Image (tube, rainbow, N blue to C red):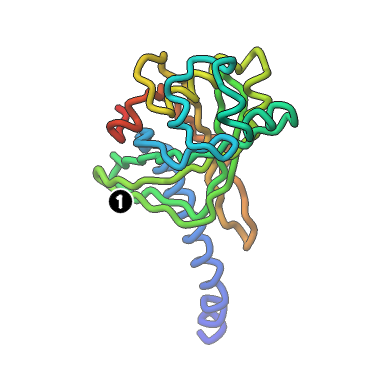
Amino acid sequence: MKKILLIALLALPALFYQCGVSRQIGEAKALGDCKYNVLSADSMFVAGYDVREFRSISKLEDINPLKYPRLAAGLLARTIPFSARVNLEVMNPTNKLAALNQLEYKVLLAGKEFANGFINQRIEVSPAGGRTVVPVRLQTNAYELLTDPATREAFTNLFRNLSGDQTTAPSKVTIKIKPTLDLFNKAVNYPGYITIEQDLTGKMLLNGNVR
């Protein structure tokens, strides 16, 4: 009897660990069943200038280099820092808790990756319609996007939409997120990506909401 009890006690940590792994996988799967919506965007800067300053500019050639010397210098140096925060709303329609401890993300424009990052914090979305907002930070060198014929028009439209322009065609943006699981004290990426595709418009800044 003592030997059986000892074996059972020794097996408990492994059982608890296995339960923890199963819980993480279940929460990550529930996250894949959630609905995603870009709620708003803010903290948008290009070469240190607020993107909203360029609302009336329809093409790159319209930018006055005397008014925006840092942008002109960036074109010469082939380095134009662009940053923004996209607020991604996650809604959980399932009857299970959706959660993760970390995630990797990529943002694509016109099918080309232009930003990526890592969120190192626990995110939970309650079941049965629970909602939470996840800030996704974008940081990239806009020079390549502006000079590459494959992305120039798409980035110019995104730039104008983020500035609040109401006449520009919607920008199709793809966000790919990959949850990270803690397995045997090692970070292991969940297989595959959760893909979110959405059209972004200038109404994001005016109304703070996109549906």
* Residue 63 in the image, given as x and y percentages of width and height: 56, 21
Determine whether 72 is above or below 2 in the image: above
> Which residue corresponds to the image point at 50% horizontal and 32% vertical from the top-left?
175
- In this figure, what is the number of numbered marks? 1
Q: Going by the picture, which residue comes out furthest to the front?
A: 66
Q: Going by the picture, which residue comes out furthest to the bottom?
A: 2
* Residue 107 in the image, given as x and y percentages of width and height: 55, 32
Residue 81: name its quadrant: top right
Q: Secondary structure at mark 1?
A: loop
- Which residue is at the front of the view, 209 or 198? 209
> Which residue corresponds to the image point at 63% horizontal and 23% vertical from the top-left?
145
Determine whether 148 is above or below 83 in the image: above
The amino acid type found where label 1 is placed reads: Ser
- Which residue is at the front of the view, 96 or 100? 100
- Which residue is at the front of the view, 200 or 13? 200
* Residue 55 in the image, given as x and y percentages of width and height: 43, 24
Q: Is residue 98 left or right of residue 102?
A: left
Which residue position is annotated with label 1? 126
Local crowd size for mark 1, using a 10 Å CA cut-off: few (<14), some (14–19), many (≥20): some
Q: Is residue 142 left or right of residue 161?
A: right
Q: Going by the picture, which residue comes out furthest to the right?
A: 77
- Which residue is at the front of the view, 42 or 109? 42
> Which residue corresponds to the image point at 51% horizontal and 43% vertical from the top-left?
137
The image quadrant where one finds the C terminus is top left
Q: Going by the picture, which residue comes out furthest to the left?
A: 128
Determine whether 149 is above or below 179 in the image: above
